[in-house]
Image (cartoon, rainbow, N blue to C red):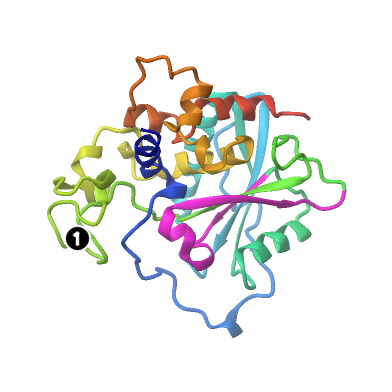
Amino acid sequence: MRRLILTIAIALLACSLPRALTPTPSAPFLPSTARMPSPTPISTSEAPTASPPLGEAIFTVSVLVDLGSEPVPRELLDTVIADATQILVEHTGIAFELVEVVEGLPPSTIDDYVRQYIAGAATVPNGLILFSFGDDDRARTYGGYSFWIPGPAGFHNTFVSPVAGDAHVYIAVLHWSHHYARCGYGEAQQPISPTSIDGECTNQPGTACVEHNGYSFCSSALGRPYAETPTAFLSANIVHEFLHPFGMNGVYDHYGTQECIQTMGWSGGGWTFSHEEAERSVGMCPSVFAALAASYQP
């Protein structure tokens, strides 16, 4: 039973949602000789800002854009951050606040890129959002992943992780153009089947594909929270990845795992898995939202 619940839950999550499709990067190939020695900040006047914070506690973030992966449309970035803020406020009372946007090319690895940014940042934020394919295409394959790295000497993160402590910066690496509930692609870059194949649509072969949000989409996912807008999944994924450092169970902090069921007191019967409820909780156990809210130590 545990294996079944976990399999269903993981299928919803950006950090555990394999993509058969490996699209061609939309940014042109840049040889190593063209790589800039350091990221190039966008001026403060040009940087998009999220909606005015609605919560009392502020979780500051900077956005890094890996131009070697794909460009990030400026007109949509505001919406994505604002919607992620709304989700976080509704669950915790905490609001994201955007510090700056930086575009550049990683000098080598993702780890090196974020360390380089932190070393030169005038103000080190609580977290970094990096839009990139990720090392070894990990974000493009799974949608996103997270980790943390030490801040500079004397740094205190006002959101204290129960596993990382208070001296680390939280990193969320995300695939900007990741397609939620893609259908009929298989290994191709364009749809090749009118129904789901190769584990698509939560491993339900033969599910009818429909055009939705600009691509071939699982009809079974229509009406779910992630399907509401073209960027709803991405906004939820930002919150999802920043929640991970505040759970104690790693992958088992996802919605619907046995650990989550026990923590939430759902094991007494009457609870059934719901895709809609899982997505409203951004694929994470509700207890992790409470842990993040309790972690604030200004």
Please state if 214 lies on the left or on the right of 195 as rendered: right
Q: Kindly identify the residue that appears in the image at 14 percent across and 58 percent down.
A: 193
Q: Report whether residue 99 is seen.
A: no
Quadrant occupied by the C terminus: top right
Please state if 157 lies on the left or on the right of 146 as rendered: right
Residue 194, position in %: x, y? 12, 54
Which of the 4 image quarters holds residue 271?
top left
Q: Secondary structure at mark 1?
A: loop
Q: Count residues near mark 1 (Cα–Cα under 10 Å), then give few for <14, some for 14-19, many for 20+.
A: some
Seen from the viewer's position, the closer of residues 202 and 222 is 202
Q: Residue furthest right?
A: 154
**Residue picked out by circle 1:** 191
Q: Kindly identify the residue that appears in the image at 44 percent across and 18 percent down.
A: 266
Q: Report whether residue 184 is seen.
A: yes
Q: Kindly identify the residue that appears in the image at 36 percent across and 44 percent down.
A: 11
Residue 15, position in %: x, y? 47, 48
Residue 74, position in %: x, y? 48, 54
Q: Amino acid at mark 1?
A: Pro
Quadrant occupied by the N terminus: top left
Seen from the viewer's position, the closer of residues 59 and 209 is 209
Tag count: 1
Which of the 4 image quarters holds residue 56?
top right
Residue 120, position in %: x, y? 77, 60
The magenta-colored residue range is 127-153
Q: Magenta stretch containing residue 142, yes or no?
A: yes
Q: Residue furthest front?
A: 1
